[in-house]
Image (cartoon, rainbow, N blue to C red):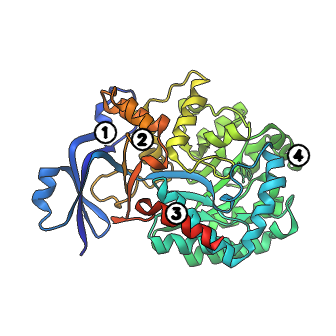
Amino acid sequence: MTQRVLRGRLLTFHREPQSGDDTGAYTYLEDGALLIRDGIIEKTGPFAEVAALAGDAPVTDHRPHLMMAGFIDTHIHFPQVQVIASWGAQLLDWLNNYTFPEETRFASERHSARMAEAFFDQLIAHGTTTAVAFCSVHKTSAEAFFAEAARRNMRMLGGKVLMDRNAPETLRDTPQTGYDETKALIAGWHGKGRNGYVISPRFAITSTPEQMEMAQALAREHPDCHIQTHLSENRDEIAYTAQLYPKARDYLDVYQSYGLLGPKSLLGHAIHLQPREIDALAETGAHPVFCPTSNLFLGSGLFDDAGLRARGMVNGIATDVGAGTSYSMLQTLNEGYKILQLQGQALHPLRAFHWATRGNACVLGLEDRIGTLAPGSEADVIVLNARSTPAMALRMERAESLAEELFVLQMMGDDRAVEAVYVSGVPATPVPDRQAAANRAMQTA
Ligand code: GUN
Ligand code: ZN
């Protein structure tokens, strides 16, 4: 048995805070601790109580920093680590001019393996301990993704994209090969260690009706797998989808008519929705996913969080790297705050930090395993420092409450604020070793 105690200022959420005064929604302990045994949180509480149970377990003291559950990113593209920050285009041109050519490189096993290592290094450096990722169309890319996740013992979800049209030839599967490769990947990786497979038709534009039928078959045969795709991100995309699927009542109807909507479905963007689509989303329990930095970067539009929540939807929040411009869920919350401000929806920091942890876990139906520091949870823990830059330290001199500190982290924080990361109770590199990781990346480039 391996065990350890982490001591620090501790924050964990029990439910979504309804307001800034909703103290029942979370536990905050000035001198808190976790007892971790074999990767699982055994006890959460005041340090004195935890220490009494801990025997001779080693103690790591992270005070005065803040311990919380690791961040969860519910929409990110693994093969886009080298197209992030590509200039000037909106969605369809960005895909055709930058992203599709880049993704063709993931036919190579070697390239996929190298990028997987770099991708997971970035997630850890930014405090993200679980992500839901699109791989490229190539089975090799998903193999590299899951192998690296398993090596690091991270709870990761992902899948190879299904795409059989409107893309370069080397980036197209067929309905049959997409089905067969997905089946093989599910057999090889779903439920292995902490990995979960996500059935991933990229979006309506890149899948023929025949491929959507195959995606439907996969979803029926594997009801325990999540499903991910993109929805109503950009007006030209919506118009093109209507041309390609003339019988669909609207964009969502493409996915709905192939049985792809349910509580395990994640729909990236969901910005320009018709009333019927909102009704259908609410009925099916599918989850819109807000991708703030991406939506600003591609000029896509403003996600209506409050409008969808008022209809009972449980929205995710995510980076969408490489259209998203930061791996940091802190920076994602920062830009999310601004997008919601433009619509008169001020995102309270308590709700923001709930969203990036337990909220996204609820979107995935995994809140009993990740997203909180409750006993029984997997010990994916991050330690945040709200004084990690001189500007933040200066601002923090005037902060008087937990909510203020969280808001400083939300607006000014990034990977520099991540002091430590534990995955399954074990310290994860490269946070203390950032320069070494950068050097390694230079050498292998
Ligand atoms: N729609 C289809 N593919 C993509 C993608 O890779 N990124 C974004 N932002 N939207 C998409
Ligand atoms: Zn995306």
Closer to the camera in the image, 218 or 98: 98
Tell me the element at label 2: helix
Residue 270 shows up from this direction: no
Q: CA distance from mark 2 to mark 1?
A: 9 Å
Left or right: residue 433 compared with residue 287: left
Q: CA distance from mark 1 to mark 4?
A: 48 Å
Quickly name the residue at label 4: 246
* For discs 1 and 4, the disc positioned in front in the rendered view: 1
Tell me the element at label 1: strand
Q: CA distance from mark 1 to mark 3?
A: 30 Å
Circle 4: residue type: Pro
Label number found at residue 26: 1
Q: Residue at x 80, y 49 (%)?
A: 94
Closer to the camera in the image, 65 or 433: 433
Tell me the element at label 3: helix
The vertical placement of 349 against 367, above or below, is: above
Tell me the element at label 4: loop
Circle 2: residue type: His
